[in-house]
C-alpha cells in the first residue's frame, strides 16, 4: 500500500510538471503568434501600398500600339 501511494505521488508530480511545461509552452506560442500576426499585418500593409503605387504608375504609362 505504501509503495502504491509513492508511485501515485510520483505520477501526480510528473503530471503537475507536465502541466506547468505545457502552460509555459502555450504562453510562449501565444506570444510568437501575436508577433507573427503583427508582422503579417505590417507586411500586408506594405503590399497594399506597393500595389497602389504600381497602379498609380501604370495609369501614366501609355497603352502600347498593336
Image (spheres, rainbow, N blue to C red):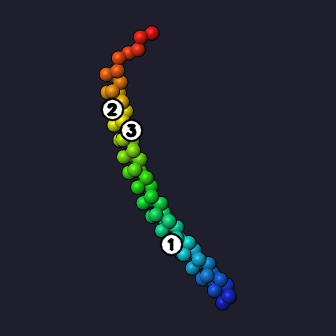
Judged from the image, the secondary structure of the residue bearing numbered disc 2 is helix
Does residue 60 lie above or below 39 as drawn? above
Q: Quadrant of the C terminus?
A: top left
Residue at image x 66%, y 90%?
A: 2
C-alpha gap between disc 1 and disc 2: 50 Å
| Whole-percent x, y for residue 36 in the image | 43, 52
Identify residue for label 1.
20
Residue at image x 34%, y 21%?
A: 61
In the displayed structure, does residue 40 sit left or right of residue 18? left
Does residue 37 lie above or below 8 as drawn? above
C-alpha gap between disc 2 and disc 3: 10 Å
Residue at image x 36%, y 41%?
A: 46
Identify residue for label 2.
53
Identify residue for label 3.
47
Along the viewing direction, whichever of 59 and 20 lies nearer the viewer:
59
Of the numbered discs 1 and 3, the one sitting upstream in the chain is 1
Q: Quadrant of the N terminus?
A: bottom right
| Whole-percent x, y for residue 16 in the image | 54, 75
C-alpha gap between disc 1 and disc 3: 40 Å
Residue at image x 33%, y 27%?
A: 57
- Neighbours of disc 3 within 10 Å: few (<14), some (14-19), many (20+): few
Amino acid at each position: 500500500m505504501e509503495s502504491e501511494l509513492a508511485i501515485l505521488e510520483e505520477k501526480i508530480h510528473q503530471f503537475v510538471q507536465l502541466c506547468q511545461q505545457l502552460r509555459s509552452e502555450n504562453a510562449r506560442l501565444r506570444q510568437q503568434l501575436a508577433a507573427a500576426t503583427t508582422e503579417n499585418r505590417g507586411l500586408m500593409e506594405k503590399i497594399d501600398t506597393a500595389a497602389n503605387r504600381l497602379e498609380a504608375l501604370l495609369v501614366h504609362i501609355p497603352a502600347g500600339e498593336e
